[in-house]
Every structure is written in C-alpha cells, then in structure tokens.
Image (cartoon, rainbow, N blue to C red):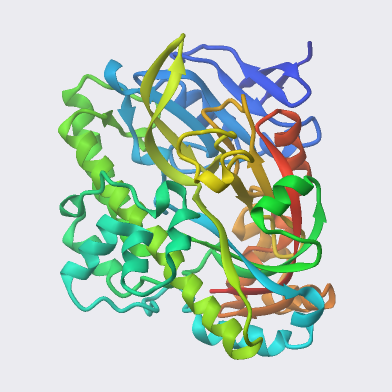
Amino acid sequence: MMQRVVATVELVEETPERWRIEPRDGMRVPGIVFASRALLPDVSSDRCLDQVVNVATLPGIVGASYAMPDVHWGYGFPIGGVAATDVAAGGVISPGGVGFDISCGVRLLTASAQREEITRVLPRLMDQLMRDVPHGAGPGGVWRLDTGKELDGVLSGGSEYAVERGFGVPRDVDRCEDRGRLRGADPDAVSVRAKERGRAQVGSLGSGNHFLELQAVDAIYDATAAAAFGLTQGQVCVMIHCGSRGLGHQVCSDHVRVMGPAMHRYGISVPDAQLACAPVQSPEGAAYLGAMEAAANFGRANRQVLSVAVRRAFQRVVGAGAVDLLYDVSHNLAKLEPHMVEGQERVLCVHRKGATLALPPGHRDLPADLSVIGQPVLVPGSMGTASYVLRGVAGGGAFHSTCHGAGRAMSRHEALRRISGPALRRELEAAGVTVRAGSLRGLAEEAPFAYKDVDEVVLTCERAGLAQRVARLVPIGVVKG
C-alpha cells in the first residue's frame, strides 16, 4: 500500500487507479480519487483535492466524495467531482455542485461521409459552419424566441419541445439523456433576468471552452458497441460542446444568493461559502432544483437547435447524406436518482460537476436499442489531441459516473503567457486541424498543452472500471467562439 501527501491531503493507494482520502476534519464520508500515478502531479496541482474533502462534509452525503482523473479546481465542487446526498435523510442540493454552466454537455453527430470525402471540401464546410453556427459571448442564437410562452416551452420541454417546433426529428429525442427533458423543471423559478439573458441564445455555442468540432474515427476498441452506436473507421463526426449560456449562469447566481441565508435557518455550516446549500426538500432546495432543471432543458434545446444548423451546413456543402445523433449527455447537473445504499434503494441527489453519466447495460433509463450495450459516454479532449466515445459498464461505481474530458492542467492566463492565438492557429493548421475562431485570444486560452493527457485520463477510467473505450476520434476542424 502506497501513501502520498498531496498539498494538505494524504492519499492511500487502494489500486493503481484508485486512491482514498480517509475521513477527517468534519468529513462524513471518505474521498475517492481516480488517478493513475502518471496523472497524480496534474490532479494535485491546484489543491482541488481539498475541495473533495470539503464536499465530503455536506449534510446527508452518502458513499464517498469522488474525483475523476480529469479533476481540477472549480467553484465549490471541484470540476470532475461527483457526490450524492440522501434526500429523505435531509440531504442537500448545492449550486456549487453544478456550477454556473448548468447542463453544459456534449452531443455527437455521426455523418455518412468518410474523412477523404470531407477533406476535399473542408475549407468550404468550415466556412459554412462558421456562418451557420452562432458563436461568441453575445446573443444571436439560431432560434429567436418570439414570446415568453415559447421560452417557457423550452424551459419545460427541452429537446423534445425543440423537435416539436421543427428543430430536428423524433429519433433525436430518443438519443438524448432523459429523452431530452427533465420533467420537474419549473420555469416560474427562473428569474426575469435569467429569461432575458436566454431569450436570444437558443442555438448558440458561446465562448470559453465551448466548441463545435469535426472529427474522424481514428480507432475502434469495441466493435460490437461501435456498430450499435453507428461508428465506423474513418467516419466523420461532429461534436458539439456547450450549455445553457447566460440563462444558466444567472440561475446559479440567483440561487447562490438565496442559499447563503437559508443555511443558517437549517443549522448548516460548510467549510467553503461556495458550497452554499439547502435540503433538497426545503422550499429553497426545491426552487433551485426546479430552476436548475429548467436551465438544463434550455441547454439540451440549445444543442438540439445547433444540430439542425450543422445538418443544414452539411446539406449545402456536402450534399445528400445522413447526419444522425449518436447521443447527447450533460456533465454539469444534479439529478434525483434511485441508487442502492446499504442494501436499500434510496432516492439520491447526485451532483455531477465536470463528470458524465455512464449508465450500465440494462439500465431502465436507456433507450431500447442501447440497453444491451450501455450508455454512450462522450469525452472531448483538446483541439490538438483526441476525443473518445466510451460506454457505461456494469458495476461502474461513483453513482454511474465517469470523466467528462481531459481536464485543465494549466490556467487560461498561463496558456496565454505561453502562446499567442495566431501562433496556435498556425500550429493546429500544420497538424491538419482547420480552425475557425471568433477570438484568437480565446483560442490560445484553450491550447492543447493546457490540458491533461486525455488518452491517460480515459485509460485510467477504463482500468478503474468506470467505463469502457469504444472509439477514438481525432480533430480535423474546429469552430470556436
């Protein structure tokens, strides 16, 4: 057994990919860190493991406070953190366990075209995507909502409502987590200011680490799962990474302000003000849950509308051919889920912040055509490396969760200090990645070297039994805000 002291945290090795933080200093459960020895220096570089310890003090928490191998410092919870609280036992919900980009997630579209076919028209296709896909920090979504009733429809109905209004086809809904809609959403719990910020942003990428990326299937590890997912060697895919935009940010800000005073009324104290929380079954907890689910529906509708923009761009440049949805899954969300706790099924509030749901084969929430295989898990890497499609596995642990990406190893400021936007664009173009960016500064902030090794992150998840690799995708073109 190996022990390592990282910052103020002592890690005890349970397996080569799993480390334990013993309960101390108010921790109600242990911390569990999934990381290979190669990843430990990056995992521990910003004291995010102290946040894992802080999360383990939350009222009603069960099991463990988990950190995925892509973990890094975040608001309240670490990004790459997973924790669950027992609702009936007074378990809490915390905006810090979701973050400001509620329902940030990933959608993967599979095209019928092969890489060689797309290469011939790649500059034209990238130009068309740049025109058709709104990007950047401001408004300008594809779908301009005419009335408050339409916005409430988005907040209540998510992807399902978008498809009903002509943005997509019924199959798209079947290939979304929760069929694209959280049914507990409460549009009335979303503030006027949040609605104002979201009205003009449905169908827009935003900025920061959000992107649209053309990718090609570079390797297949599980032929049976790949066939079920519709993936073939050399096939072109489109990955979309974005969330609920300004609306979700405002929802989080609004409810963080409410949670602080509420904690005193419920006798709750936390080691970090960013972990402000309230019991799920309290008025404050229920209001946040309803508003958060509404913002999640907004994020899912946002990605659904962007899918339509991608299909139109392909039709204009490539011509006839299918562009189908493989799956859409969030990685910033708190959900009420049934899980076994000490031999009994309990309703838990599972916080996944920078962590992806990974349902195992046979799970009740999977569509029928994926039940035998397990849920597709979408893991973006960086512009210069690779992304992955995984699948959920039986006995995965961590409340059916796995990594959500490579995870930052360097701050945006440090990335800007090391490279300029024009220099990075030249490097990417030389490596065969066509770049379209609204902001070269924003491009430099997301330099590939600012992220952990996504191959090692994903392999660690597989060795830890959290998910299984299905396919590796390499970038050929990227649109950034």
**Where on the picture, by quarter, is residue 42?**
top right
Name the residue nearer the viewer: 207 or 17: 17
Name the residue nearer the viewer: 14 or 73: 14
Q: Is residue 17 above or below residue 378?
A: above
Which quadrant would the N terminus be assigned to in this image? Answer: top right
The answer to whether residue 298 shows anywhere in this view is no
Residue 50 lies left or right of residue 26; in this view the side is right
Please provide percent x and percent y for residue 314. 60, 82
Please provide percent x and percent y for residue 148. 17, 69
Of all residues shown, which one is farthest toward the front?
A: 368
Q: Residue at 32% across / 22% down in the picture? A: 91
Q: Is residue 32 above or below residue 289?
A: above
Q: Residue at 68% across / 72% down in the picture? A: 112
**Where on the picture, by quarter, is residue 432?**
bottom right
Residue 443 lies left or right of residue 222; in this view the side is left
The answer to whether residue 43 shows anywhere in this view is yes
